[in-house]
Structure formats: structure tokens, C-alpha cells
Image: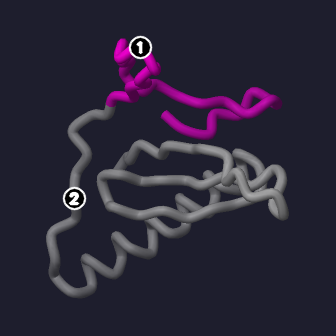
């Protein structure tokens, strides 16, 4: 299964370089150091959560697509379909 992960800096002064990783389809949030650390934490958390749902015979959510939208102070917004994120080494982190 494939899930969208939204990354954002933690904005905590004592944790520079840390990011939150949100997985909206599963209603999960975690964090990690750097983008790759946050992505790894999200993958681990999502895998564990999906396994837990399956172990209990519960339905596993399927993401049907994701869009990211930004709202400006003027009330205007810009929306785009989520594609992929690559690390500085060119490794694909998210599709």
C-alpha cells in the first residue's frame, strides 16, 4: 500500500533539524531527524499500524489520492497533486 506523508519542521528550539511526519490516511503522526529520518519513522509507524489492524481483522484504509494546498493571508490558495520527494542524494523518499 502507498500513503502520502506530509513533512513539516517541528519548530522546537531544542530540536533543530527535526521534522513531523503526518500520514493523513491513517491518522498518524511521528517525527524524526531530517527528512529521511522523519520518512523512516513514518514508514515504520505505518507498517506497524497496518499490521495491527490486520491482526485484529480490521479494515486497512486505502488512500485514493492526495492533494496539498497552501493558504495565503490574502485568502488565495494553491493546490497541487502530491507526486514524490527526493533526498539530496537523488534517492526517492516518497511517491
In the rendered image, residue 19, in percent from the top left (x then y), is placed at: 67, 52
> Which residue is at a point 42% across and 54% down the rendered structure image?
23
* Disc 1 element: loop
Q: Is 11 on the left or on the right of 52, as rendered? A: right
* Disc 2 element: loop
In the rendered image, residue 21, in percent from the top left (x then y), is placed at: 55, 53
For label 2, the crowd category at 10 Å Cα-Cα, with few meaning under 14, some 14 to 19 and many 20 or more, is few
Q: As drawn, which residue projects farthest toward the bottom?
A: 56
In the rendered image, which residue does mark 2 sit on? 61
Tell me the number on the disc at residue 54.
none
- 48 is higher (above) or lower (below) than 66: below
In the rendered image, residue 46, in percent from the top left (x then y), is placed at: 44, 64
39 or 54: nearer the viewer = 39
- Magenta-tinted stretch: 67-95
Real-space CA distance between mark 2 and mark 1, rounded to the nearest whole angstrom: 35 Å
Upstream in the sequence, badge 2 or badge 1? 2
Magenta stretch: includes residue 77: yes
> Which residue is at a point 60% across and 55% down the rendered structure image?
20
Magenta stretch: includes residue 34: no
For label 1, the crowd category at 10 Å Cα-Cα, with few meaning under 14, some 14 to 19 and many 20 or more, is few
In the rendered image, which residue does mark 1 sit on? 74
Q: Is 18 on the left or on the right of 84, as rendered? A: right
Q: Is 82 on the left or on the right of 94, as rendered? A: left
Q: Nearer the viewer, mark 2 or mark 1?
A: 1
89 or 37: nearer the viewer = 37
- 27 is higher (above) or lower (below) than 5: below
Amino acid at each position: 500500500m502507498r500513503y502520502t506523508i506530509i513533512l513539516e519542521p517541528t519548530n522546537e528550539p531544542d530540536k533543530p533539524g527535526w521534522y513531523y511526519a503526518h500520514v493523513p490516511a491513517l491518522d498518524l503522526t511521528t517525527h524524526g531527524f531530517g527528512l529521511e529520518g522523519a520518512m523512516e519513522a513514518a514508514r515504520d509507524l505505518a507498517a506497524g499500524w497496518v499490521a495491527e489492524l490486520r491482526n485484529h481483522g480490521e479494515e486497512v484504509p486505502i488512500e485514493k489520492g492526495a492533494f496539498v494546498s497552501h493558504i495565503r493571508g490574502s485568502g488565495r490558495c494553491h493546490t497541487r497533486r502530491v507526486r514524490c520527494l527526493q533526498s539530496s542524494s537523488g534517492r526517492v523518499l516518497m511517491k
